[in-house]
Image (cartoon, helix red, strand yellow):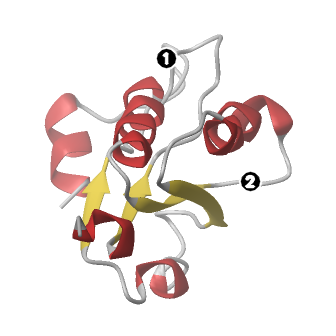
Amino acid sequence: MDDTTHRLALLTGAGWLPNYGCAMVGSWVVHDAVSAGYRVRAVVRDTSRPDKVDHILAINNMGFSGSVELHEADLADLGSYDAAFAGCAGICHCGAVMGRPGANKETPQEVFDGSF
């Protein structure tokens, strides 16, 4: 038996805002993991926003053996990921501090350093 159906993976930065392309990579990582049979916890900042989560939840209706569930957390809130991390076999961090041009003052190095 393929044990991927029993593995739980966590993916941060799964939400997607079409106007800016934020976390488009994360959305595709979720898709690929679910299509490979993984149970995925996708973490977004706001689970109540259809524009950021409906495309992720739709992956559950694509006939894959894996599944995705949403969790709400924010990298800026210490401890907000604790429940989502519980029991995960692996974590894929696809989130970063990004925004509209000029809105964020972080350099690429600061974004990189803040992700680890």
Give the percent coordinates (x, y) of residue 100.
55, 18
Q: Nearer the viewer, residue 82 or 2?
A: 2
Amino acid type of the residue that numbered disc 2 sits on in the rendered structure? Asp
Q: Where is 13 relative to 41, above or below?
A: above
Mark 2 and mark 1 in contact? Answer it, CB < 8 Å: no
* Residue drawn at the location 64% of the way across and 24% of the way down: 17
Give the percent coordinates (x, y) of residue 75.
46, 63
Amino acid type of the residue that numbered disc 1 sits on in the rendered structure? Gly
* Residue drawn at the location 27% of the way across and 55% of the way down: 92
* Left or right: where 25 falls relative to 100: left
Q: Is residue 82 visible?
A: yes
Q: Secondary structure at mark 2?
A: loop
Q: Where is 56 relative to 42, above or below?
A: above
Q: Is residue 43 visible?
A: no
Give the percent coordinates (x, y) of residue 5.
37, 66
Give the Cα separation between the discs numbered 2 and 1.
Answer: 23 Å
Q: Secondary structure at mark 1?
A: loop
* Left or right: where 81 falls relative to 63: left
* Residue drawn at the location 51% of the way across and 16% of the way down: 21
* Left or right: where 104 falls relative to 7: right
- The local crowd at label 2, few if under 14, some if 14 to 19, many if 20 or more residues have their Cα within 10 Å, is some
- The local crowd at label 1, few if under 14, some if 14 to 19, many if 20 or more residues have their Cα within 10 Å, is few
Q: Which mark is residue 72?
A: none
Judging by the rendered image, the residue that carries numbered circle 2 is 46
Judging by the rendered image, the residue that carries numbered circle 1 is 102
Q: Where is 76 relative to 57, above or below?
A: below
**Front label number (2 vs 1):** 2
* Residue drawn at the location 45% of the way across and 36% of the way down: 31
Give the percent coordinates (x, y) of residue 107.
24, 31
Q: Nearer the viewer, residue 56 or 106?
A: 56
Q: Please report whichever mark, 2 or 1, sits nearer to the chain's N-terminal start.
A: 2
